[in-house]
Structures are given as structure tokens and as C-alpha cells.
Image: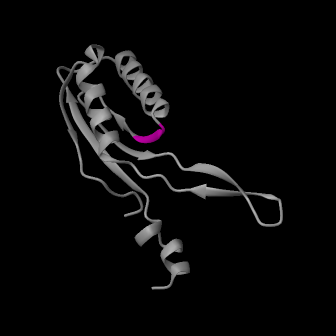
Amino acid sequence: MTKRMRKKKHKGEFNHLGFDVHGTFDAPITWQQIDDVVDSFIDFVEGHGMQVGGGCCQTSFGFFVTAVRRIERLKTWHRHWERRLADQHATEAHQRAVLDWFRATPTAKVATVTVGPLKGSWT
């Protein structure tokens, strides 16, 4: 497959890595408590250079976490600045940080948390 097709289909070096996070709560919790947990989790994730998608119900939750793509400014040979997206992948350190956050958050009343392996976010 050509480089152009790999980029278009998000394969090989153009695949963006992320991981699943699934868990359950101790007991059914209120929607206000769910909002508090999700808001604080989003703040944590964004503060660590990641982004998240997913959701919760009153007994369980499921998210997919990836690293944020950042824009780099590169000086080209003709003295102009060029903006380019720099891929950044989720790592095992990101997985550990998310798992540690859920274990350290007492207000979440989380019974179980599982963090899945790194996988391509386009598959």
C-alpha cells in the first residue's frame, strides 16, 4: 500500500493509538454524581494532554482515551513558518495515570476499573 493510501486509511505509521477504559460503580449513583465524575475525569484527561470520548449510566461507564494531536511550527527553507500536525500516541504512562486517577478518586465510588491495551483509534 502506498504512503498516501496508508495516510488516507490511517494505517501503519498514520494510526493513532488509544485505549479503552471500562468500569462499574459500587451502587447506582445519581445523575449529579455522574456529572461530577465525568467533569473531573475530563479535566484530568485534558490536563495530561489527552482527549476522551464515551459515557456513563448509573451503574457503569466506558471511555476511549487518546493523546491530543499538537500543531508544530516549523521554519522552512524559504523563511516562512509552516504548521504541521504532529502525531502523539497514547502510551503505557497514560494508561497508568488514568488507572491511578480512578483508584485515587473517592467521590467516584468506583467498584471496578479495567484499562484495555493500546490499539488503533481508527479500527
On the rendered image, what quadrant is the N terminus found in?
Answer: bottom left
Residue 81 can be seen in this image: yes
Magenta stretch: give its range.
Answer: 49-53
The residue shown at (29%, 14%) is: 107
The residue shown at (43%, 40%) is: 52
Dividing the picture into quadrants, the one containing residue 31 is: top left
Residue placed most toward the observer, 121 or 58: 121
In the image, residue 111 sits, relative to residue 123, either above or below, namely above
Dominant secondary structure (helix, strand or loop) of the stretch shown in magenta: strand
Q: Residue 8 at what x, y percent from top left? A: 53, 73
The residue shown at (43%, 42%) is: 53
In the image, residue 110 sits, relative to residue 122, either above or below, namely above
The residue shown at (47%, 41%) is: 51
Q: Residue 117 at what x, y percent from top left? A: 24, 52
Count how many numbered circles sit on residues in the image. Answer: 0
Residue placed most toward the observer, 58 or 24: 24
Dividing the picture into quadrants, the one containing residue 15 is: bottom left
Residue 101 highlighted magenta (yes or no): no
Q: Is residue 90 left or right of residue 24?
A: right
In the image, residue 66 sits, relative to residue 4, either above or below, namely above
Q: Residue 84 at what x, y percent from top left? A: 65, 58
Residue 58 can be seen in this image: no
Q: Is residue 84 left or right of residue 118?
A: right
Asked which colour scheme the image uses, the reply is one colour
On the rendered image, what quadrant is the C terminus found in?
Answer: bottom left
